[in-house]
Amino acid sequence: MSVISDKLKKAINKVLNTPADEIKKIVDVIVSNTRQGKDEGSKINNLLDKIKKAESSVETIQNSIKSLKSVKKTLEASKTAADNVKKATSIAAALNPPAAAAAVAQEFVIKKIEKEVEDVENTINVAPTLIENFKKTIKEQKDRLKEAQEKKKQKDSIREQRKRNLNS
């Protein structure tokens, strides 16, 4: 893996995957407690704040992807320059043994740049899917919370109605 794409993948994991997993766990607890009749109002509000922060961090990843695209263009330009240097050192190698060594070293540099460009491209291609998955997960968790709140209100309403019927 390349250094650049590794950094972005770590950022994606920190900004998207970790919060999404934490949010899922908290929603599971809240839904379970709500089904048992507990009032989870403050936890829900805290969770919604956490979700807003996580959603705003998606913009950070999108900006990083834009930067990564610029880096990819720079790497591609570097590869072109390295190819040209290799050609020049190959010609010089016919007359000078140290130039032949430089040509071999230049080939190594070119291969490293190609690998870096490939890894960056793969990361750029995968990142939008990860962002969409994150957004989908967050939406699902919000829906679960909303549904749990509605069921709690319905149960409370029925419980209150029963009390009124028993007292009448």
Image (cartoon, grey):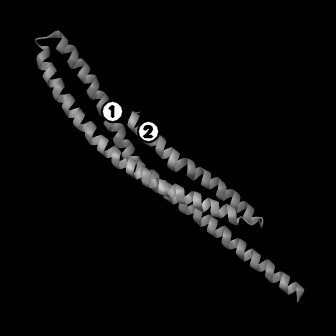
User: In this orientation, does residue 36 appear?
Assistant: yes
Q: Amino acid at mark 1?
A: Lys
Question: Badge 1 local density, few (<14 within 10 Å), some, or many (20+)?
Answer: some
The image quarter containing residue 69 is top left
Residue 66 vertical position relative to residue 92 in the rendered view, above or below: below
Query: From this viewpoint, which residue is outermost toward the bottom?
Result: 168
Residue 7's label in the rendered image is 2
Secondary structure beneath label 2: helix
Q: Amino acid at mark 2?
A: Lys
Asked if marks 2 and 1 touch (Cβ < 8 Å), the reply is no
What residue appears at the point 74 percent right and 61 percent down from the top-left corner?
A: 33
Residue 154 vertical position relative to residue 116 in the rendered view, above or below: below
Mark closest to the chain's N terminus, 2 or 1: 2
- Horizontal relation, residue 149 to residue 85: left or right: right
The image quarter containing residue 137 is bottom right
- Horizontal relation, residue 49 to residue 34: left or right: left
Q: Nearer the viewer, residue 38 or 32?
A: 38
User: In this orientation, does residue 133 appear?
Assistant: no
- Horizontal relation, residue 106 to residue 60: left or right: left
Q: Residue 156 in the image: state x and y as whole percent.
A: 76, 75
Q: Would you name the residue on which mark 1 appears?
A: 115
Q: Nearer the viewer, residue 71 or 159?
A: 71
Q: In which quadrant is the C terminus drawn?
A: bottom right
What residue appears at the point 80 percent right and 77 percent down from the top-left corner?
A: 159
What residue appears at the point 59 percent right and 50 percent down from the top-left corner?
A: 21
Residue 40 vertical position relative to residue 15 in the rendered view, above or below: below
Q: Residue 94 in the image: state x and y as whole percent.
A: 11, 13
Q: Residue 123 in the image: state x and y as whole percent.
A: 39, 43
Q: Disc 2 and disc 1: Cα gap in Å?
A: 16 Å
Task: Tell which tag, 2 or 1, sits nearer the viewer.
Answer: 2
Question: Badge 2 local density, few (<14 within 10 Å), some, or many (20+)?
Answer: few
